[in-house]
Image (cartoon, rainbow, N blue to C red):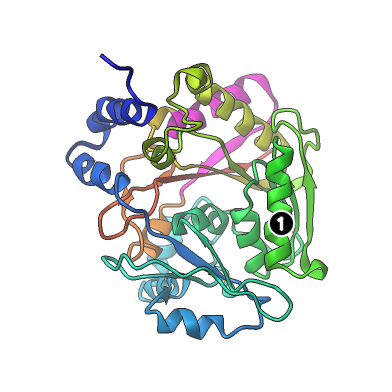
Amino acid sequence: SKPMLPTEKALGYFDTYFKPVYGDLWPSIRVSLLSGQKYGAVLNNYCQNETENFLKDLGAKNMIEIAQNAKSGWNTSDVDSVNKDGEKLDLPENLKVFTYKPGNISDFPPPKPDKSKLLGYYLLDASSILPVISLNIKPGEKVLDLCAAPGGKTLTMLQSLIPVYITSNDISASRIARLKTILKYYVPLSHQYVDTSCVDARQLSLPHSFDKVLVDVPCNCDRVSLLSDSNNIFSPVREDKRLKMSALQKDILVSGIKHCKPGGSIVYSTCTLSPPQNDGVIQAALEQIWQNTPIDVSVEDISIITQQFKDTFTFFHNCRHGQLVIPSLTKNFGPMYIAKLNRIK
């Protein structure tokens, strides 16, 4: 028999390991992963074009505004109790992310440049703005984006127009070059409050320097694993890397925790449905931190985002430490796992 293609191997693996976890939801998640994913358009606040009206004319809606409206319908005592162990999650009012409504699978056309060559919007999986929203950045904070390339999350922070100082790090020089290119097309030089750094996230050495740390780790990238056989994490040459993935993720997260100031917070995210790479990594990192360092961290309950964004995303509610966007046919975003830790000391 001819050897299995990496994409076939990935699907077999997901059927074996995800079906028991997601049960009755699995057939819907599976077909959604194999279908075209939905995108969101992060509006470029620096572009001079009439982009917002253009996106509205296409029929797209600002999902942040929809979340704001969902939020204003609650009574406040409910909201406070949802997030009792952390700070209040504010939605950045200047961040505008347009998506088509559930069931509408239209594509966004490529963005057009304005007279100063800035593009009108940046396309990404809309669920990847949730880690940035969960960071809850505040004016004047120092933020570390530990695995920053290709740059969508750094760009989303800049488009929130909250003046913060960002250090964007990635292990790959070519990917950092790509991040710089993206910034060039979206943010005027005078507003690029970004230092780039190119080191292994486990080796970065700026301990206790940041108010907020985003740890968006390399992972199985379930969607990509089913889409393309080239450079696939399920190919035989990358098997060793795949088997060591959750250990690498834990080491990167531990590094992220060490880079956070006491009183600050860390958001961990992946684009996989794999429990060992999600809740499992949080658990392993907590145990390592508690056992081997004087640092103390706690998990913050961010389930409030599942209420705010329920009109845009489908969430799985049985994770232990984090929240998980699962792909569904009408809301085909994700997967995106997000967990938040607060550094106490």
Residue 212 image point, x, y percent? 67, 50
| Residue found 48% across the figure and 54% down from its top | 84
- Name the foreground residue: 85 vs 247: 247
User: Residue pushed farthest left?
Assistant: 24
- Name the foreground residue: 187 vs 292: 187
Residue 181 against residue 205 in the figure, above or below: below
**Magenta extent:** 277-301
Residue 312 image point, x, y percent? 36, 64
Residue 166 against residue 14 in the figure, above or below: below
Dot 1 lies on which element? Answer: helix
Question: Circle 1 is placed at which residue position?
Answer: 181
Residue 170 image point, x, y percent? 69, 40
| Residue found 32% across the figure and 45% down from its top | 33
Q: Is residue 345 left or right of residue 105?
A: right
| Residue found 27% across the figure and 52% down from its top | 328
- Name the foreground residue: 277 vs 190: 190
Prevailing secondary structure class for the magenta stretch in the rendered image:
helix
Query: How many discs mark residues in the rendered view?
Result: 1
Can residue 211 be seen here? The reply is no
Placement of the N terminus among the 4 image quadrants: top left
Residue 88, image quadrant: bottom right
Residue 120 against residue 290 in the figure, above or below: below
Placement of the C terminus among the 4 image quadrants: top right
